[in-house]
Image (tube, grey):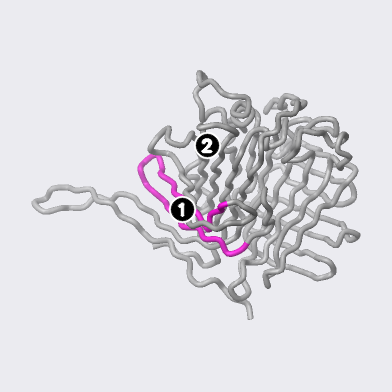
């Protein structure tokens, strides 16, 4: 039986957006050979609708009462992930900005958008640094084993200092380090619509820290928030807004004892080619790292099945998910995820935080009657103890 000594937290991000038919400028992605793993993959500008962002999340190990744990999500943006098709120049919006969302341990939420005049990435080998004007910066070393980040925007009410240490190796959505895109999930002979092609061939995803430890200090409108906990960091890019390519996007991420995991379930615009990805590691050893079209195969897959429902802003949303991994050898890991709170909680974007319980199922051999060797399934529970509570 597996037991976790810390709270088990998950994040689910959902996106609902209408397809925008306006013409867009779509610069081609840079070649992988010229780009460090956590570097800049495409060119963005105020005169195009290309977008690239670097995402960090940290969640506290301790909780207060029945509230979700203290947490923070920081995104360093170049361009806009959801758009009506207009450029930053046309709309008069800043090209570069930092978004900070989170919760105090008592459940109080906070949200900030900090515009900047620049958002530059510099590299040296695999080492990457990002500087967003005077408002924020981040750095990843050559070995990709850690990350530091800060936000210095006292005029907007937010300051932050964050340090991550990875415990699991980097990966792309479908493989370790071969290809940052999802095109391996579809046959080369598959006919793709414009949104499908944009999603499968041009939306990139690189996860530098799939799981790790976080040390966080924030000052939010004069109130300090400091905690240690779990860490996650990835980056995405696309030569057009997300709503040009996808109509819904669920991202799930959790840490359970020695296990780090994530999954994505994506519905491209007007498409039946729904994608799932699955990443699962134990003590830093990868058990699964795959992407596939839903229904295309029965092993080496993951599934994210919504459970429960509630109505918000006219949308029917899940109260949780069942996240299951079926490995290539047939072993199954399954987790029930239940929401505790949400921030942001918008019609187009929800970020839920909650708890998870799960099971690992494999096969064992044993001596049956009359010395006949039999094979029988075995499932071990992975159960979190009660969340640690602060006084």
Check the image and report above or below for 137 versus 20.
below
What residue is shown at x 54% (from left), y 46% (from top)?
Answer: 263
The quadrant of the image that shows the C terminus is bottom right
Report helix, strand or loop for mark 1. strand
Residue sitting at the far front: 314
Numbered label tally: 2
Crowd rating for badge 2 (residues with CA inside 10 Å; few <14, some 14–19, many 20+):
many
Report helix, strand or loop for mark 2. strand
Q: Earlier in the sequence, mark 1 or mark 2?
A: 2
Residue 344 % position (x, y): 69, 56
Check the image and report above or below for 103 versus 295.
below
**Circle on res. 197:** none
Residue identified by numbered label 1: 322
Decide which of 222, 374 is in the foreground and name it: 222
What residue is shown at x 38% (from left), y 37% (from top)?
Answer: 298
What residue is shown at x 57% (from left), y 38% (from top)?
Answer: 173
Position of 223 compared to 238: left or right? right
Give the magenta part as a residue range. 316-341
Residue 203 % position (x, y): 65, 33
Check the image and report above or below for 197 versus 380.
above
Decide which of 319, 325 is in the foreground and name it: 319
Crowd rating for badge 1 (residues with CA inside 10 Å; few <14, some 14–19, many 20+):
some
The quadrant of the image that shows the N terminus is bottom left
Q: Are marks 1 and 2 in contact (CB under 8 Å)?
A: no
Residue identified by numbered label 2: 275
Residue 66 % position (x, y): 58, 73
- For the stretch drawn in magenta, the main secondary structure is strand
Report how far apart the C-alphas of labels 1 and 2 lie in the structure. Answer: 16 Å
Residue 116 % position (x, y): 88, 46
Instruction: Reply yes or no: does residue 326 show up in magenta.
Output: yes
Check the image and report above or below for 16 versus 219.
above
Instruction: Reply yes or no: does residue 340 show up in magenta.
Output: yes
């Amino acid at each position: 039986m597996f037991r976790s000594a810390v709270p088990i937290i998950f994040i689910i991000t959902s996106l609902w957006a209408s397809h925008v038919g306006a013409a867009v400028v779509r610069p081609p992605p840079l070649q992988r050979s010229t780009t460090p793993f956590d570097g800049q993959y495409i060119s963005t500008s105020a005169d195009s609708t290309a977008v690239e962002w670097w995402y960090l999340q940290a969640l506290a190990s301790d909780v207060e009462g029945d509230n979700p744990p203290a947490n923070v999500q920081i995104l360093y943006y170049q361009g806009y992930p959801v758009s009506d098709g207009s450029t930053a120049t046309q709309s008069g919006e800043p090209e570069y900005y930092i978004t900070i969302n989170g919760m105090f341990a008592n459940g109080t939420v906070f949200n900030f958008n900090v515009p900047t005049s620049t958002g530059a990435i510099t590299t040296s080998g695999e080492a990457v640094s990002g500087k967003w004007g005077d408002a924020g910066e981040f750095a990843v070393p050559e070995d990709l084993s850690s990350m530091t980040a800060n936000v210095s925007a006292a005029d907007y009410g937010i300051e932050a200092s964050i340090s991550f240490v990875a415990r699991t190796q980097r990966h792309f959505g479908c493989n370790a380090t071969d290809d940052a895109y999802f095109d391996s999930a579809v046959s080369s002979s598959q006919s793709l619509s414009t949104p499908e092609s944009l999603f499968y061939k041009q939306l990139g995803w690189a996860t530098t820290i799939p799981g790790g430890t976080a040390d966080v200090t924030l000052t939010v409108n004069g109130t300090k928030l400091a905690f240690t906990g779990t860490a996650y960091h990835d980056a995405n890019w696309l030569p057009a807004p997300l709503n040009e390519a996808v109509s819904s996007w669920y991202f799930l991420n959790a840490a359970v004892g020695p296990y780090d995991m994530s999954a994505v379930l994506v519905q491209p615009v007007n498409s039946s080619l729904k994608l799932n990805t699955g990443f699962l590691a134990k003590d830093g050893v990868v058990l699964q790292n795959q992407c596939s079209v839903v229904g295309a195969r029965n092993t080496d897959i993951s599934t994210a099945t919504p459970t429960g429902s509630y109505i918000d802003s006219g949308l029917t949303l899940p109260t949780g998910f069942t996240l299951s991994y079926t490995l290539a050898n047939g072993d199954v890991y399954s987790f029930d995820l239940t929401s505790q709170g949400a921030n942001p909680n918008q019609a187009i974007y929800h970020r839920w935080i909650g708890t998870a319980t799960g099971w690992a199922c494999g096969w064992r051999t044993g001596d049956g009657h009359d010395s006949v060797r039999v094979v029988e399934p075995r499932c071990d529970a992975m159960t979190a103890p009660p969340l640690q509570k602060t006084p």
